[in-house]
Amino acid sequence: MTSTSELRQKRKDRQRTKLKRISPDKLRLTVHRTNKHMYAQIIDDTKSATLVSSSTLSEAAKELKSGSNKEAASLVGKLIAEQALKKGITEVAFDRSGFLYHGRIQVLAEAAREHGLKF
């Protein structure tokens, strides 16, 4: 039997291959979630460098009661979009890292779109 993490890894690999084929020159907004926190970062694959990152562990997210709810995801989406716009990044490819586009992942993506990122 394949475990849940192995299935997520397969989805992640499949999605990354498709992203690299469709938009190889775009920056990638990668999202990761755990049971306690949310993380987002914008990565330049050509330079193998992280340009912008945000999470529920940052100083701006200290007032949150929980780092694992939709409110926290919305805040992380807002923070990543604001930081990206400060650096002049407006268009990215969304990489959900094998997670389903539902719940916290969807809320983070919509918050990033509302605050100026295009994907």
Image (cartoon, helix red, strand yellow):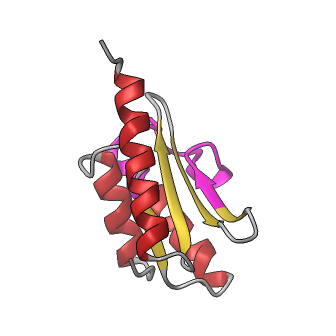
- Using the image as rendered, state which of residue 43 and residue 69 is in the foreground: 43
Location of the C terminus (image quadrant): bottom left
Q: Residue furthest top?
A: 1
Please state the horizontal and vertical placement of residue 37, each as a whole percent of the image.
Answer: 50, 37
Please check the rendered image and state whether residue 74 is part of the magenta-colored stretch, yes or no: yes
Q: In the image, is 47 to the left or to the right of 105? A: right
Please state the horizontal and vertical placement of residue 49, each as a whole percent of the image.
Answer: 75, 63
Residue 98: in sight, yes or no?
A: no
- The correct choice, above or below, for 71 with respect to 79 in the image is above
Location of the N terminus (image quadrant): top left
Q: Residue furthest left?
A: 102
- Using the image as rendered, state which of residue 87 and residue 47 is in the foreground: 47
- Using the image as rendered, state which of residue 64 and residue 106 is in the foreground: 106
Question: At 65% from the left edge and 66% from the top edge, which residue is drawn?
Answer: 45
Please state the horizontal and vertical placement of residue 68, each as a whole percent of the image.
Answer: 41, 36
Please state the horizontal and vertical placement of residue 2, each as a whole percent of the image.
Answer: 33, 18
Magenta segment boundaries in residue numbering: 53-75
